Amino acid sequence: MLAVRVAVSGELASDVRARALGLHLAAAAAAVREQVSRQRDVVVPVLAAADNADDGAAAAELLTASLASADRVLSVVRATSPGASALLAQTAGVGALQQLGIATRALWSALVDHERLWAAGAAPLARRLLSERARTTCG
């Protein structure tokens, strides 16, 4: 985030720094995409399979919220691609850097919201449901 702010302020001193920032942003975006996709792939089948009435309603609500949150993160990640590509190609102008800064702030916000939802709701419920399923299957 700081690197993008420095770039947007016009203090990006060299092509090497621009390229390094572009590589860093591309790698970070790929890591975010992979992490959120993996979380979605894990939580969807578990929450969708919740069968008792109490957990079923909570699971359905968390499933909907988790999918919407993951989709938001993934769409915002895509918005950082043009700026990262422009940095890599060393063609980023002030406008592209400003758009990248906006997209990066939006990504940070979406990611924080998603991780909060994941850590507070979806992951604990999915773990509990899997533990209960394992106990009933094995016990």
Image (cartoon, helix red, strand yellow):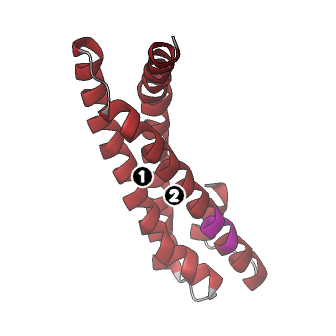
Q: Main secondary structure of the magenta part?
A: helix
Against 32, is 40 above or below?
above
The image shows residue 130 at horizontal and vertical percentages of 47, 24
Residue at the location (65% across, 65% down)?
27
Against 24, is 132 above or below?
above
Report crowding for label 2: few under 14, some 14 to 19, many 20 or more residues within 10 A (C-alpha).
some
Residue at the location (45% across, 15% down)?
132
Three-letter amino acid code at the position of disc 2:
Arg
Q: Secondary structure at mark 1?
A: helix
Residue at the location (33% across, 44% down)?
67
Say if mark 2 contacts mark 1, CB within 8 Å: no
Q: In this view of the protein, which residue sits in the foreground, 69 or 95?
A: 69
The answer to whether 62 appears left or right of 139 in the picture is left
Q: In this view of the protein, which residue sits in the foreground, 90 or 32?
A: 32
Q: CA distance from mark 2 to mark 1?
A: 8 Å
The answer to whether 63 appears left or right of 11 in the picture is left
Q: Quadrant of residue 109?
A: top left
Using the rendered image of the protein, determine whether residue 11 is visible from the camera's viewpoint: no
Against 35, is 117 above or below?
above
Q: In this view of the protein, which residue sits in the foreground, 57 or 130?
A: 130
The answer to whether 7 appears left or right of 104 in the picture is right
Q: Quadrant of residue 63?
A: top left
Query: Which residue corresponds to mark 2?
Result: 33
| Quadrant placement of the N terminus | bottom right
Q: Secondary structure at mark 2?
A: helix
User: What segment is highlighted magenta in the picture?
Assistant: 23-27
Against 139, is 91 above or below?
below
Three-letter amino acid code at the position of disc 1:
Val
The image shows residue 90 at horizontal and vertical percentages of 64, 87
The image shows residue 37 at horizontal and vertical percentages of 47, 52
Query: Which residue corresponds to mark 1?
Result: 73
